Image (cartoon, grey):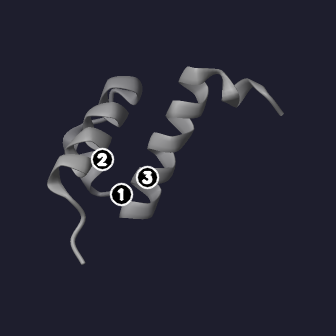
Amino acid sequence: MTYATERINEEIAYIAYHFHWSLDDILDLEHADRRQYAERIAALVTGAGNQG
């Protein structure tokens, strides 16, 4: 099973925008790690990361 190119590009853009990481650094991440970073960024952006 392959991961949709559009979704990968969305994750890359999202992480790069918020963390200012290079494309190579982001592509070096395992899929699960990249997905987790994107989810954590989303939580911080929406304020959910402030609950705890």
SS at badge 3: helix
Of pointers 3 and 1, the one earlier in the residue sequence: 1
Q: In the displayed structure, would residue 38 be above or below residue 34?
A: above
Packing grade of label 2 (10 A; few <14, some 14-19, many >=20) is many
Q: Amino acid at mark 3?
A: Arg
Of pointers 2 and 3, the one earlier in the residue sequence: 2
Disc 1 and disc 2 in contact, CB within 8 angstroms? yes
Q: In the displayed structure, would residue 28 be above or below residue 20?
A: below
The alpha-carbon separation of the residues under discs 2 and 3 comes to: 11 Å
Q: Amino acid at mark 2?
A: Ile
What residue does disc 3 label?
Answer: 35
Mark nearest the camera among 2 and 3 is: 3
Which numbered tag is attached to residue 29? 1
- Residue 30 visible to an observer of this rendering: no
Q: Is residue 24 left or right of residue 46?
A: left
SS at badge 1: loop
The alpha-carbon separation of the residues under discs 1 and 2 comes to: 6 Å
Which is nearer the eye, 39 or 19? 39
Residue displayed at 17% across by 47% down: 6
Q: Is residue 10 left or right of residue 45?
A: left
